[in-house]
Image (tube, helix red, strand yellow):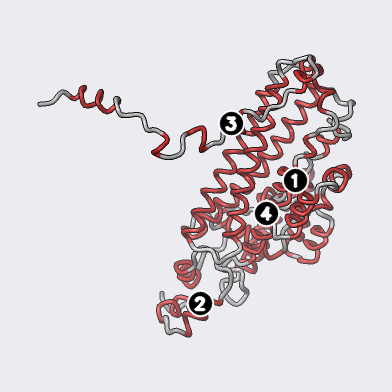
Amino acid sequence: MSCPMRSIDSAQDGEQLGEEAGMLYAEYLMLDKILGAQRLLGEEYHAPVHDEHLFIITHQAYELWFKQIIWELDSIRNVFSEILEESQTLEILRRLNRVVLILKVLVDQVMILETMTPLDFMEFRNYLRPASGFQSLQFRLLENKLGVRQENRVKYNKNYAKVFGNDEEAMKQLDVSENEPSLTDLVQGWLERTPGLEMEGFDFWGKYEKAVEILFKEDEERANNEKTEALRRYRLNDLAKRKEIYESIFKSEIHEALVSRGERRFSHRALQGAIMITFYRDEPRFSQPHQILTLLMDIDSLITKWRYNHMLMVQRMIGATQLGTGGSSGYQYLRSTLSDRYKVFVDLFNLSTFLIPRSYIPPLDDNMKNHLCYWGPIRKNEQEVDERKTNGDAEVQKNVNGQIR
């Protein structure tokens, strides 16, 4: 019987592969270009600063991760633009989760840069002018592809021509990213096609509105039964405010007014779809869509956290009143980007405002359950079903017509 350890040792003594076997590690990764891409201006001015190397490496790492996020976003947007099948939904989940994990790395990466003291930064800061993070083309493309609208940007951040006007290729990329459908646009269209919103079918919205009316009526009765006058007035005032809030979603004209003011992003129909998915997330066919909505909120949250960490780092390094190297107000400008105007999925964060107790959620009827057995998971339109009907797909036709009980 052979010695087990001998086989392990022999496996470790394999021959080294030469160039004839293919490309080597350094060649494949083009490490000569990457590792040689750090230009230390301090050395050029014969005044080397140790932490300048950290500053450059950190920002280059950011740009590489931005490139990967854009790569993932482009692929996700491409899938959303087609009819979604269940297998594609799983792929979207994997890629969105990858973006979330990358953003977590970017948030934590700020801490590495903070190991540099303000005095260390001051030694080479003047070398940077007029370079600025505002000039990151990839971050602007990332924002546009997610759905940050031009009108929602703060004043300093609106005019790309000031920064990229002399770069024809950059301006072309920015123009394309602003005019093509963003991830927000595509998610909105996807939500608008949520099955069960049709009035002639399950009519979720109609049932939901009735459930809210019943809930409010019961709350009003309980409030009026309060023995203490002050408590009764408090409960009735609270109920009146809640009714006013719910009117903003049940009356489409109020919702559209909020959209026009920039307080909401999604169309009325898309908001309905998001609420329905949230209520029925335990249903197998709504589970993956609900996970998608959760990951989209995670992306918004993490970008906001990154902005916040970046703002605090800038305040630590240059204070609250010094101008940024690119001419912005520095800390004050970064602080202004933390508002909801930069959250592209702000409507998803506010869905909890319109939740009702589980016992009031309208139960799915048999027709809707059978419809969900076919749906996979949100169809782009009804054309595919119509084609299958025409082709004599009796099983599908039974499902769609609600004949299978």
Which tag, 2 or 3, sits closer to the chain's start?
3
Q: Residue furthest front?
A: 20
Mark 1 to mark 4: distance in Å?
A: 33 Å
Mark 4 to mark 3: distance in Å?
A: 55 Å
Label of residue 354 in the image: 4
Within 10 Å of the Cα at label 4, are there few (<14), some (14-19), or many (20+) other Cα atoms? few
Nearer the camera: disc 4 or disc 2: 2
Which tag, 1 or 4, sits closer to the chain's start?
1
Which SS class for mark 4?
A: helix
Which tag, 4 or 3, sits closer to the chain's start?
3
Give the amino acid type for the residue marked by disc 4 in the picture.
Phe
Please name the residue shown 71% across and 44% down the image. Answer: 138
Quadrant location of the C terminus in the rendered image: bottom left
Nearer the camera: disc 2 or disc 3: 3
Nearer the camera: disc 1 or disc 3: 3
Measured along the vertical axis of the image, is residue 5 above or below residue 101?
above
Residue 37 at what x, y percent from top left? 66, 30
Give the amino acid type for the residue marked by disc 3 in the picture.
Asp
Measured along the vertical axis of the image, is residue 168 above or below residue 179?
above
Q: Which residue is mark 2?
A: 385
Q: Which residue is mark 3?
A: 32
Give the amino acid type for the residue marked by disc 1 in the picture.
Arg
Give the amino acid type for the residue marked by disc 2 in the picture.
Val
Q: Which residue is mark 1?
A: 140
Nearest the eye: 178 or 86: 178
Q: Are marks 4 and 3 in contact (CB under 8 Å)?
A: no
